[in-house]
Amino acid sequence: MNLVNKGTAYWQELDRQHHWHPFTDTQALNAKGARVITRSKGVYLWDSEGNRILDGMAGLWCVNLGYGRRELVDAATQQMLELPYYNNFFQTTTVPSTELAAAIAQVTPAGLDRVFFANSGSEAIDTAIRMVRTFWAVEGKPSKTWIISRKNSYHGSTIGGTSVGGQGAQRAQGGPILPDVALVDQPFWYGEGDGMTPEEFGLERARQIEDKILELGADKVAAVFGEPIQGAGGVIIPPSTYWPEVMRICRKYDVLLMADEVICGFGRTGNWFGSQTFGMEPDLMTMAKGLSSGYLPISAVAVGRRVGDSLIAKAGEFCHGFTYSGHPAAAAVALRNIEILKAEGIIDRVREDIGPYFQERLATLSGHPLVGKVEGMGLIAGISLVDSKSPKKFFEAPGKVGQICRDHCFNNGLVMRAVGARMVLAPPLVITRGEVDELVALAGKALDLTARDLGRL
């Protein structure tokens, strides 16, 4: 786009008239005008006013390799010159989609070696829903249709994703949602575990799943869906006892475990997948975001042998898919992305170096009067803002406080997301120690300004 003779006001007005934003109060946004992002490099963005912004959210949890990676651009360009598009219907394939499926199978936990492509995390979740229910049907147990998920979980915004997600505002719009979905409480120890140790709390929340299976009947429950770490729910990191107990319960009652790795996948927690970090052994796994570092839309479902072999042998035609499933350009970028993650040792660096440094530096914010607890792992973290530390008291209007802090972040050169009164961070995996220091300093400044606005300083 030609930026000459066009300024911020022009784009804001064009945006106001025609662009309907996702997850946005569009009327409120139109009243003030959108921030216009025009370029990027590394971990930084620039807006149309020339302001530099450190992207503490890697776009939307996805730009793992950072902005401006020429190798990814070249992969897309070359593929578009050779074969810009062809589908995977009609008993055909393309080289990039086939090679990418094999590359994914090499880095997923053992046995998750069949890969079905889609275009977004939401589409991958919809695919997984159909897979688990179809699996039980072809196995002669068509009554096993119920899916158990967690309150405050996020699994996308399609009808399927909203149905298995646990966020109230989403579920309240556009109903009725899919039937046969049950929600249990989330494993948020700091927010909901008073009176228990983290280990006790993890077991208690896991056993709610067992109680729900027994209530519904094990012959009715198809799967448990869960994010290793609840990302959009505020970076809820479960106690160490939680996932091992969930796995035990799933195996005991012959219920499938579906890990939503859309946020945790491709290095965010210091392993290829969050399932590996938490010792999970899922039957299916959804992925997106970091699969291509966000450079082109692509997602996938990795399917274990029990489910995959059964569906292929018994289901006949799997009547599901998308025009752009395994799009060759997107697949070429994702394949190159995986190659770079390996060649540059980026995931090892997250686990052994920059991840621990990031968590260490963020912990210095714990002394701030608004900060109740800093929780994180690898390059993902959540900061709980509280009205009072001792006794612990949460804000009565958490969303308002979070928005104040978020706006101070953006206005002072940092993207830090607010989920209620919980501030969350997930910077690009290539962030340096110096950039981490800058991020923490900017976050501290935003916290100070928020405290000032609340009359706490």
Image: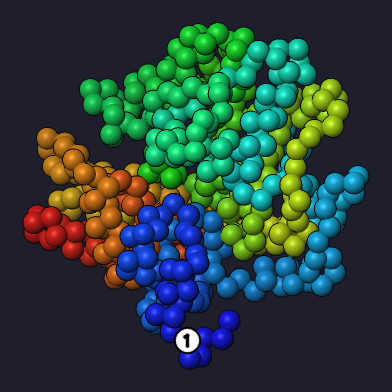
Residue 96 vertical placement versus 165 (above, below):
below
Residue 240 visible to an observer of this rendering: no
Residue occupying image coordinates x 24% and y 58%: 404
Residue occupying image coordinates x 65% and y 61%: 296
Residue 60 vertical placement versus 221 (above, below):
below
Element on which disc 1 rests: loop
Q: Quadrant of residue 375?
A: top left
Residue 2 vertical placement versus 370 (above, below):
below
User: Callout 1, which amino acid?
Assistant: Lys
Image quarter hosting the C terminus: bottom left
Camera-nearest residue between 430 and 150: 150
Q: Residue furthest bottom?
A: 5
- Percent coordinates x, y for residue 341 in the rendering: 62, 58
Instruction: Left or right? Give the position of 417 relative to 248.
Output: left
Residue 375 visible to an observer of this rendering: yes
Camera-nearest residue between 338 and 15: 15
Camera-nearest residue between 332 and 347: 332
Q: Which residue is mark 1?
A: 6
Instruction: Left or right? Give the position of 380 relative to 284.
Output: left
Q: Residues within 10 Å of mark 1 (few under 14, many from 20)?
A: few
Residue occupying image coordinates x 52% and y 11%: 216
Q: Quadrant of residue 94?
A: bottom right
Image quarter hosting the N terminus: bottom right
